[in-house]
Amino acid sequence: MSKDNKKSDNYMDYIPKHSPKYEWEKDKDGNVTILIENKGFFNRLFQKLLGKPKVSKLHLEKMGSFIWPKIDGYKNIYEIGQEVKEEFKEEAEPLYPRLVKYMKMLYDYGFIEYLD
């Protein structure tokens, strides 16, 4: 959702979904890793010359690993927050300011999109 096409000014109503640009995996302990394919001329050059990886891995921390699978294109940020509150209790506080900041960061880096 572009900033010009917001259907609501209430961030809690936004429905996030994963960007199709990135794959992700969850290990047996529930830890999520986002896989970032390094494309382009300079990335290929650095891969050959410096042995840089073709795929970089972004390991999410405990709360991020809980939140990531909840981003399903159906739940809005408020609903995701309720599940975070139920799971992490006081550890999640201040819940919504933290969650909104986290979602904005994921959006700014292109890991999630918002449904129209």
Image (cartoon, helix red, strand yellow):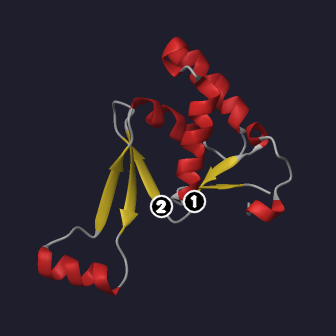
Q: Which residue is nearer to you in this view: 55 or 78?
A: 78
Q: Mark 1: give few (<14), some (14-19) or many (20+) Cα within 10 Å.
A: some
The residue labelled by disc 1 is 19
How many numbered marks, from 0 up? Answer: 2
Residue under label 2, please give it: 22
Image location (x, y in percent) of residue 32: 40, 41
Residue 53's disc number = none
Q: Secondary structure at mark 2?
A: loop
Residue at left offset 54%, top offset 13%:
89
Residue at the image position 74 percent from the left and 60 percent from the top:
1
Looking at the rendered structure, the secondary structure element under dot 1 is loop
Tell me if residue 108 comes above or below residue 33 in the rendering. below
Q: Position of residue 38 (x, y in %)?
A: 34, 71
Which residue is situated farthest in the right direction here? Answer: 7
Report whether 61 appears left or right of 7: left
Q: Amino acid at mark 1?
A: Ser
- Relative to the observer, which residue lies in front, 34 or 50? 50
Callout 2: 10 Å neighbours few (<14), some, many (20+)? Answer: few
Which residue does the image show at 54% across and 40% down from the upper left? 69
Image: 87 above or below 96: above
Q: Find residue 87 and report its image quarter.
A: top right
Which amino acid is tagged 2?
A: Tyr
Q: Quadrant of the C terminus?
A: bottom right
CB under 8 Å between callouts 1 and 2?
A: yes
Q: Is residue 114 left or right of residue 10?
A: left
Cα separation, mark 1 vs mark 2, equals 6 Å
- Locate residue 8, reporting x and y percent: 85, 47
Asked if 4 appears above or below 34 in the picture, the reply is below
Quarter of the rendering containing residue 45: bottom left
Pinpoint residue 4: horizontal percent, then vertical percent.
80, 64
